[in-house]
Amino acid sequence: MKHIKHALKEIFDFFCGDWRIFFGVAVTILVIEVIDHQGFLAFAAPFAGILFILGISLSLVISLKHEITK
Amino acid sequence: MMVWSSVIPAFLASTVEFVEALTIVLVVGVTINWKSSLLGAAIATLTLAALVTVFGSTFVLLVPIEILRLVIGIILVLFGMQWLKKSVLRYSGLKALHDEAAIFEEEMRQIKAIGGIDSRRFNKFGFLIAYKSVLLEGLEVAFIVVTFGATAAIDKIQGVISAAIGASLALLVVVLLGLVIRGPLTKIPENTLKFIVGIMLVTFGTFWAGEGLGVKWPLQDLFLIALAAFFLILCAAIVRWLKPYGFAPKTHGIDSGVIEKGRMEE
């Protein structure tokens, strides 16, 4: 179990290494998916691109903000 | 036909990683012996080539381009953010700048501290250090070659070949410079290259992941330029915001700790 945990952490660190960025990007993707698939949010579809870019940018900003408060 | 959107990121990222690997290979060559150092580097390069071939061909043969763009786009965003975050922290003074000369000196000091090395015979420790450093630095190169190569063009095989050419070219340039200079490549602007690669990874990742999620980008592929410009401006603004908090020393040596790790496992 310890080895599996260690291996998963290594993989996570290689591909991302920051939980704030990971969750930020994940939430952004979720929002875009919801906009794309839920009819009542269709009005937001033209802004999906902007929301996607904003979500990614915010993830970076939040992660860096954490660095200065550490 | 060359796929430039594969060649350029692969070339730049590989240059950065190979410069870092070269420093360790040089340290091992100078302090232990060239036989162990070069053999370790050569076998690591073969390992990386095998990884690119296996994963590259799997992506090319088995995964449709639409799925590839979504999955790889997301991974590239996450992966690129690491590069971008480190670069922004370095430019704002919150993280020390990468300095190959300092790393060279520090790694050399660590190897000399071990002592008892017969420089005429093949040395397993030296071989492992060179192998590990080239493999670890090269893994990121292999990842970029496979992802950019398989995703950048509709002809995925051509894409992977183009990315591999970019990486090989970087290897050739770094090796030739290493042979001429016979020391760490301190003149290569590593920090700037890392920043450029970070921007490229996040830009392409955002574009492909967005496409995969059903986002209709205006201007099609030309929108990549607008995205790159946006991330560039964003990073410049973040650096301005973070600069007052910067306190790190101007340069810094060890990031990888390859030798320390090698010693522990020896």
Image: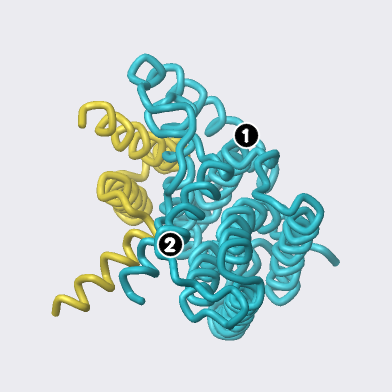
Chain colours: A yellow, B cyan
Amino acid type, mark 2: Val
Residue nearest the observer in this picture, B56 or B117: B117
Chain of the residue displaying label 2: B
Does B257 sit left or right of A39 as displayed? right
Q: Residue furthest top?
A: B244
Q: Which residue is mark 1?
A: B226
Query: What residue lies at 39% left-to-right and 69% top-to-bottom?
Result: B262
Above or below: residue A58 compared with residue B70: above
In the rendered image, which quarter contains the N terminus of chain B?
Answer: bottom right
Q: Quadrant of residue A55?
A: top left
Of B244 and A41, which appears nearest the observer?
A: B244
Give the side of residue B39 with respect to residue B237, left or right: right
Q: Residues within 10 Å of mark 2 (few under 14, many from 20)?
A: some
Expressed as whole percent of the image width and height from the top left, the position of residue B92 reads 44, 24
B185 w.r.t. B157: above or below:
above
* Label 1 – label 2 distance at C-alpha: 39 Å
Horizontal arrangement in the rendering, residue B112 relative to residue B246 (left or right): right
Q: Nearer the viewer, mark 1 or mark 2?
A: 2
What residue sits 74% from the left and 72% below the top? Answer: B161
Q: Which residue is mark 2?
A: B258
Q: Are marks 1 and 2 in contact (CB under 8 Å)?
A: no
Quadrant of the snapshot with the C terminus of chain B:
bottom left
Q: Chain of mark 1?
A: B
Which residue of the protein is positioned furthest toward the left in this rendering? A1
- Toward the right, the furthest residue is B1
Q: Position of residue B253 (x, y in %)?
A: 46, 43
Q: Quadrant of residue B115?
A: bottom left
Above or below, B14 relative to B131? above
**Considering the numbered disc 2 on the image, is that residue within a helix, a strand or a loop?**
helix
